Amino acid sequence: MRKKTPHSHASPPAPSTILRVRVGRHRTVHLTVVVFVLLSMSMMIFAGMDLLARNLIMRFAPDVALEAPVPISSPAPSPVDVSHLSLRDLDLHPDHLYEPYFSGLISINNQAPQASRRILAFRKLLERYRVRQVQDDNFTIRVIDNRTNATLEVFSLKEDRNAHRLTHVTDWRQVDRDRAKETRRLTKKYRARGFPRQAITIKWGRANQVAEARERDAPFVEYEIRLAAQLGLSLLATEIGAVETFNDDRLVSRVGARSRYQIMPYLLRKNDIHHYLLRTSTGTVVAVFEEWNPLLTMEPAFLLMRGYANAVGHEIPGLSAYHAGPFNLFKIYEAYIAQAHPTDTAPRVLDAFIWGLTDGYNIVSKRTYFRAASRGYVPAAYGTLLADEDYPIDTTLTVLAERVQFRDGYEIDLRDLLTALENAGLRPPRDADRSASLYNQFRALNPHFVLPPAPDSAGVPDEGNVHLVARVGTAHVRFFLPSGSSRRLKDAGIDLIDPRATMRFDHNTYAVPPDHFQTRWDRAYDRLVQRISNFGFTNSNRTLLDSLVIRFDDLATANPSSYRLRQQRVIHTHADVWQSRWWVRLAQTTSANAGRLRARVQPPDHLRTTDPPN
C-alpha cells in the first residue's frame, strides 16, 4: 500500500499547480519508477512467453468437438483378417514403411552422398544382426573385422550343442558364460595377429532363444500386431519383448526392470500394475505378480514407446529410446547438429539417429550412455522380426479371454466362482483342451497368480482356493476368465463383475478405429509430430503440445473409451519428456544451429477457430 504524504499547516497551493510541482520536484524518482516498471514488464513478458501463448491459444480456441461416448468395453470395428497372412505381407513391416533405410533402392544423390553411404552402413549393421538372430544358433561365436565387415572366424561350442540336441533342455546363461570365456580367448588371438581391439567385433548367435521367444509369444502376437497398428507403429514394436527378455515374463534386470517388456517399477505402479497377496480357504496366501501377465503389461509398454517416439520425432529412434532413454537420443541429435558438415546435415531426426549408429557412433558412445547394447537394439529387433516373417500368423493360438474385476465390496472363493461358471454351462472353446479343468484353465489364463498345480480330476485344491476380492489396499484385483464368463454369471443372477472395468480380448481387440474417431485435436497432434521429425524442437511447439494435452484430457473425460484413454497416456508421456532439461538443451542447440540444417523447421500450427465441427 502506498504511504500517504503528511499534510502541511501552510495554505495549500492552487490545484492547477499541484501536478506541475510534484513532477518537477520528483522528476528523477518518477523516471526511475517508469524505467523499473518497463523493465519488469519486459522481463515478465519474456519469462512467461510460453504461458502467455498457451493462454491466448486456449482463450480463442473453440470448444472441443467430442465423439459420442461409448463404454470402455465396447468392441472395436471388425479388423482385417490376418490369420492367413505372414508378417512379410503386412503393411506394418519396416521394409514397406521405411524405405530406403531397411530395404529398396538407395538413390546416390550428389547433394547428400554421405547420407546414402550411412544408409548402406546401417544396412550392413542390420545384416549382421540378421545373421545373429536368424542364422547363428546359441552355440556360435562369430568374429568380425569392423573395418571390412568380413567374418574372420566362426567358432562353435560343439559339446554344448550336442548336449542340447539330446536333451532339448539348456541353461542359456551357462552357455553365455562358456561363450564369454571363448570370447576372451578369441580376442587375444586376433590382437596377437595385429588386429586393433576397436576393429574386432564378436557376436553371439541367438537363433535358439529367438525361436523360444516366438513360441512364448504365439498366444499374444496377434494383440501386439493390432495394438501396433492402432498406435501407428511398425512391426518392430512387436519385437520389444523378444529383444528385452526373449519374452520371459519373470525376468528381472539388474536395475529392477520387470516383465517381458522390462518396465521399471515406478512405471508399473503408475500403470496400476502391482504385487499383492490373496488369502485362501486354508489360511495360506497366494502371491500375485501382475507384471507376469503380458495382457496387463503390453499396453503400458507400447504406449510408453509411442510416447517416446513422438517425443524424439520418429518411431525408429523412439524404439531405441525405449531401451536407452529419450534423453540419450536428444544428446545424439545435439552431436549430429554440432559435428556434421553443414551441407550434409539433413533436417530429419531419423538421419541423425542413423548417423549416431554409423559415422557418429564413436562420438556419441563417448558423450552418452549410448553404447554397444543401445546401438544393436533396433538391428536386433529387425533381425528377430525376419526370423519368422514368412510364416503365416496362427491366430488359432491367440488367447481369448476377458479381463475382469469385482464391484467394490463383492468377494467370492475361486472354487465357488468356477462352480457357478460350470453350472452356467461354460465350456472350453473349440480350439482349447476340453480335458482341462476350469481350475487349470484359470491357472493358464492367470500366470500372474502363483497357484499350485493340480490334476484335472482334483478340481480346485484347498491351497489354490483363493478368496477373490475387489481390491487389496489400493490395488484392483484383476484377473482373466474364459470368454463369455461375465454374461453367463449375470444371467445366472451372480452380479459380481464391474462391467466398466471389463475388457474383452478377442480378434476385434485393438482394431484401428474408424476415421470419425479422429478429432481436430488428433489431427493437430499428428501435424505436430510430423514437424518434430524435422527437428521441430521449439518452444512454440512445446506451447502447442501443452495446449493439446488439455484438449486430450477433455476428450478422455467426455469419452473414456479405451482408445481415447490410450491417446491421453501417449501425449502425457510426450509432454513429460519435453519438460526435461535435456529437451531444453536440445531446443537451444537446434535454434542456435538452425543455419546448419538444410531446410527450415516448419512454423507452428495455429489452432484455428474456423475449423468445421467434428
Image (spheres, rainbow, N blue to C red):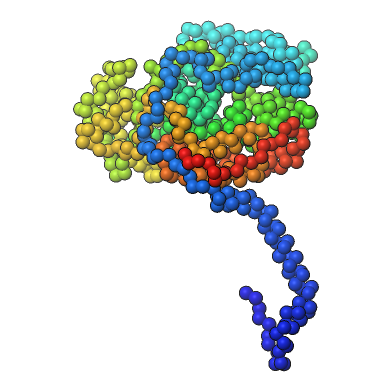
Residue 245 horizontal side relative to residue 541, left or right: left
Picture layout, residue 542 above or below residue 254: below
Displayed quadrant of residue 180:
top right
Picture layout, residue 608 above or below residue 341: below
Is 254 in front, or is 48? Answer: 48
Residue 451 place in picture, x, y as percent: 35, 29
Please count the marks in the image. Answer: 0
Q: What residue is at 29 percent from the left and 44 percent from the top?
A: 409
Q: What residue is at 25 percent from the left and 38 percent from the top?
A: 495
Instruction: Residue 483: tell me if it is visible.
Output: yes
Is 282 in front, or is 491? Answer: 491
Residue 124 horizontal side relative to residue 454, left or right: right
Image quadrant for the N terminus?
Answer: bottom right
Displayed quadrant of residue 277:
top left
Residue 546 place in picture, x, y as percent: 57, 45
Residue 588 place in picture, x, y as percent: 71, 42
Residue 584 horizontal side relative to residue 560, left or right: right
Q: What residue is at 55 percent from the left and 15 percent from the top?
A: 386
Residue 42 place in picture, x, y as percent: 71, 58
Picture layout, residue 539 above or below residue 448: below
Instruction: Residue 415: tell me if it is visible.
Output: no
Q: What residue is at 65 percent from the left and 76 percent from the top?
A: 2
Displayed quadrant of residue 600:
top right
